[in-house]
């Protein structure tokens, strides 16, 4: 196993970590900030849910298609210049989203934004792996999980605020200055030698193996469940329970805020207990949270929703820190971009499934995709069906992880 050598002074490493954390935050913010705007966009463009849903799905699809390519370009052309290119594209695309005059242009601009986010997500993880020592890998991945959760938390709350103050365009304009700051920091703080090693592009099958496959599959299932909360949550809280947009944003931010607090401690647990034990605890909490979401909200309203999220989201942080650490620990420097890309690819396939397939399940449970005119009882039925399915998915994830560990312990 290759050790990650100390690359710079503590002060320089702090600057590196801030830059990479902000880059990861932007990619996560781009994923979540548009979800709360879906009802507003449906009204603004007089479009049904299935059409405005493409504003979320287009970003995730572009990110998913591009993320492994971004990792390979980082390995072959240098991680720093490719990260800076991604930040520049993300900034320009954010402006284009805010200037869109129709739904088609907005969706096209979101595609460009998703491509830029692919570089931010894959290369931030690879660069962070380069910047820390072997003993601190878990904490580094926990930090990235924390800022990813921060972006998820800021998305609904910041989005709700911007819609109230500036209309839907503000949710995209606000991302431009953040991307510009991250680009300046990347130029100033990332040393040229960090991630400088350039290697021939690795064939995907050279890093994709039986040991990595379970990590990727479980990543897909978990991400789909988490995305379902972001897509279904605003409709259930706003239309099923009748909460106002600002209050919906506040409630939607509770879970991610808990993840922010639990991110770095989750990484420390991985360093102390090992990734296997922490992975099992995280998946157990995810399964329990999904079951509670199917039952409690329809019985005790918003209190039940919040209690369910309080169980679900710490499980996600524990899972992310453990799963990413397990996947990246034994990977050589010239393949970290590709493996980081594969982790992001699997996560984003899950996010797309959560936004599209789980959204379709929700619509099926409601009985129509015209949610604005659906009865609260129909919205509640859709919520229950969605998370009953999510509970089954988490049981499958536990089975995959358990079988993988059992096979790994079996003597050859």
Image: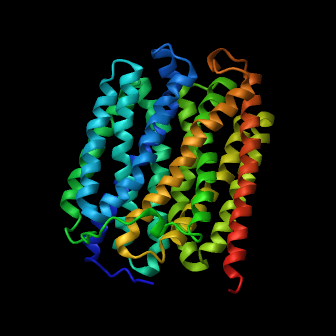
The N terminus - image quarter: bottom left
Q: Residue at x 71, y 54 (%)?
A: 394
Q: Is residue 302 above or below residue 99?
A: below
Q: Position of residue 275 (x, y in %)?
A: 59, 73
Q: Quadrant of residue 106?
A: top left
Q: Residue at x 35, y 24 (%)?
A: 105
In the visual, does 67 lie left or right of 286? left
Q: Position of residue 79 (x, y in %)?
A: 28, 62
In the visual, does 365 lie left or right of 219? right
Q: Quadrant of residue 173?
A: top left
On the question of residue 167 being in view, the answer is no
In the visual, does 287 lie left or right of 162? right
Q: Is residue 316 above or below residue 174?
A: below
Closer to us: 78 or 154: 78
Q: Residue at x 32, y 35 (%)?
A: 94
Q: Residue at x 46, y 47 (%)?
A: 64
The C terminus - image quarter: bottom right
């Amino acid at each position: 196993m290759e050790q990650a050598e100390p690359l710079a002074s503590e002060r320089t490493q702090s600057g590196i970590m801030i830059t990479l954390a902000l880059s990861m935050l932007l990619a996560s913010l781009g994923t979540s900030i548009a979800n709360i705007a879906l009802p507003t966009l449906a009204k603004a463009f007089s479009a049904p849910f299935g059409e405005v849903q493409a504003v979320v799905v287009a970003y995730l699809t572009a990110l998913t298609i591009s993320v492994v390519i971004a990792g390979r370009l980082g390995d072959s052309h240098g991680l720093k210049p490719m990260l800076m290119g991604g930040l520049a594209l993300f900034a320009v695309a954010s402006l284009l989203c805010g200037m869109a005059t129709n739904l088609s242009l907005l969706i096209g601009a979101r595609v460009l934004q998703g491509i830029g986010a692919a570089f931010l997500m894959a290369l931030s993880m690879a660069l962070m792996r380069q910047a820390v020592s072997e003993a601190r890998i878990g904490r580094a991945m926990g930090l990235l999980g924390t800022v990813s959760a921060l972006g998820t938390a800021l998305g609904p709350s910041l989005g709700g605020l911007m819609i109230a103050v500036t209309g839907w365009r503000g949710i995209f304009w606000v991302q431009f200055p953040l991307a510009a700051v991250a680009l300046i920091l990347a130029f100033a703080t990332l040393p040229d030698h960090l991630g400088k090693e350039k290697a021939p592009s690795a064939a995907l099958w050279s890093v994709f193996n039986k040991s990595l496959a379970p990590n990727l599959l479980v990543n897909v299932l978990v991400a789909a469940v988490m995305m379902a909360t972001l897509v279904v949550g605003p409709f259930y809280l706003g239309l099923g329970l009748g909460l106002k947009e600002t209050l919906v944003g506040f409630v939607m931010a509770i879970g991610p805020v808990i993840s922010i607090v639990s991110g770095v401690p989750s990484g420390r647990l991985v360093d102390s207990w090992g990734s296997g034990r922490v992975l099992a605890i995280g998946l157990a909490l995810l399964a329990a949270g999904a079951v509670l979401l199917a039952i409690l909200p329809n019985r005790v309203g918003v209190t039940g929703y919040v209690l369910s999220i309080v169980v679900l989201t710490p499980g996600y942080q524990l899972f992310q820190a453990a799963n990413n650490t397990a996947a990246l620990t034994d990977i050589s420097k010239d393949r970290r971009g590709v493996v980081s890309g594969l982790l992001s690819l699997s996560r984003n396939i899950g996010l797309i499934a959560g936004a599209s397939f789980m959204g379709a399940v929700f619509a099926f449970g409601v009985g129509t995709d015209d949610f604005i005119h659906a009865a609260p009882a129909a919205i509640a039925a859709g919520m229950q069906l969605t998370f009953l399915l999510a509970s089954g998915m988490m049981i499958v994830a536990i089975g995959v992880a358990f079988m993988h560990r059992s096979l790994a312990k079996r003597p050859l």
